[in-house]
Amino acid sequence: MARSGVTYEDVQRAIDELLAQGESPSVQKVRERLGTGSFTTISDHLREWRQRRAQNRDVPPPRGMPAALQELAEGLWRQAQESANEALAHYREEADRRAEEAREGATEARRLAEDAEQREAALAQHLAGTEARLGSLSAELARREAELEARDKQETRLATRLAELESLLARHREEAQRLADEHRQALEAAEASHRERLAREEQRHESAESRLMALLDQARQERQALEKAAAGREAQLEKRLERLEGQLQEAHGRLAEEEKRHRETDWARRQALAQADTREHERSLLQARVDEQKRHLEEQAGRVRRLEEQLHRCLWQIPGVSDQEEASPQEADTGEDELAERRGAPDETPPEATR
C-alpha cells in the first residue's frame, strides 16, 4: 500500500507537468519532480494513473470541438499514448530487471546470512572446543610442572643422600686405613720388641728356666692379645664393610627405582654405579689388605713358634736343666709336658734337638 506522504494527486500533477514538457512519465522522473516519496508509492500511483488513462481511452472527445483541433488532439493523444506505452514497456522491463536483481540480491543476502550463521555456529563450536582443550592443556601443564618440581626435589634429596654416603664411605675408608696402619705399626713394634727381648735373652741364656718360661709365657700372652686385638679389629672392619655394602645396596635400589620413573637421571645413575664399582674395588683392596694382615699375623705366629722352639733348644742346652733331667727323668718329663702345654705344641722332642 502507498504511504500517506505522497498522494495520487501529487503524482498526477507531476505526470501532467512531464507530459506538458513532452517527456514520458517514469518513477524516477516523477520522484525527481516531487523531490520526495518512495519508489514503491510513486510506482503504485503511476500504475493507477495508467489504469485510469487506459479506461478513459475509448471515451469520445467532447462535441462541438473543431475538426482540426480534434485531429490535433487525437494526434497528440496517440503520440502521448505511444510514448506512454514505450515508457511503460521500458519501465516494466526496468522494473522486472530490478525486481529480479532485488530477488537475487535477497536470495544472495539470505544465503550469505545462512552461511554467516553457519560459520558463526561453527566458530562458536570451535571456540568452545578450543577453550575446553585449552583448559585441559592448562591442567595438564600444571600437573606436569608439579611432577617436575617433585622430581627435582627427589633428585636433590637423592643427590644429598649420595653425597652423605660418599662422605661416610670416605670416613670409613680413612678409619680402616688408620686402623690398618695402627695394626701394622703395632705388629712391627711387637716384632721389634720380640727381637730385642729374644736378643737379650740369647745373650743372657744363663738365666734361670723360670725367667725364660715367664718371658715365653709373656710373649705368648702378648701374641695372643695381639691376635685377639687384630681379630677384633678385623671383625669391626668386616662389620663396617657390611654396613657400607648395605648402604650401597640401598642406594643402588633407590637409584634403580628413580631410573624406572624417569630417564632424565640416567647420567646420575651411571655415575652412581661407577662410584659403587669404585667403592667395591676399594672394598676389595681393603679386604686384600686385611688378608695381607692375616697372612702377616700368621707369619708372626710362625716366627713366635720358631722362637719358642729355639728357646726350647736353648733350655735343652743349659747344663743345669740337663743335670736335672738326668737326676729326675720323671720331673723332666713333667716339665717338658708343662712346657708343651704352655707352648700349645705336641709332646715330642723337636727334630732339631735330636740332631
Image: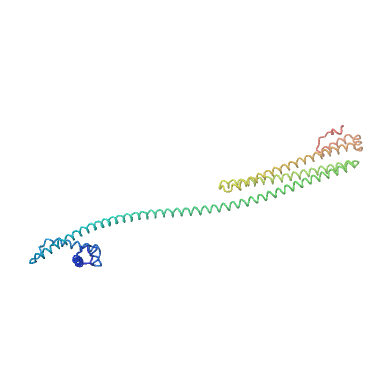
Q: Would you say 294 lies left or right of 40 here?
A: right
In the picture as drawn, the residue positioned furthest to the top comes out as: 355
Q: Would you say 150 lies left or right of 245 here?
A: left
The picture quadrant where one finds residue 103 is bottom left
Rendered view: 350 above or below 81:
above
From the image, which quarter does the C terminus lie in? Answer: top right
The picture quadrant where one finds residue 296 is top right
Instruction: Give the colour scheme of this rendering.
Output: rainbow
In the picture as drawn, the residue positioned furthest to the front comes out as: 68
Q: Would you say 4 lies left or right of 219 here?
A: left
Residue 225 x %, y %: 78, 44
Rendered view: 182 above or below 52:
above
Question: Residue 115 or 165: which is nearer the viewer?
Answer: 115
Rendered view: 94 above or below 301:
below
The picture quadrant where one finds residue 299 is top right
Residue 216 x %, y %: 84, 42
Q: Would you say 241 lies left or right of 192 here?
A: left
Question: Residue 300 or 47: which is nearer the viewer?
Answer: 47
Residue 57 x %, y %: 13, 61
| Total marks placed | 0
Residue 18 x %, y %: 20, 65
Question: Residue 48 or 206: which is nearer the viewer?
Answer: 48
From the image, which quarter does the N terminus lie in? Answer: bottom left
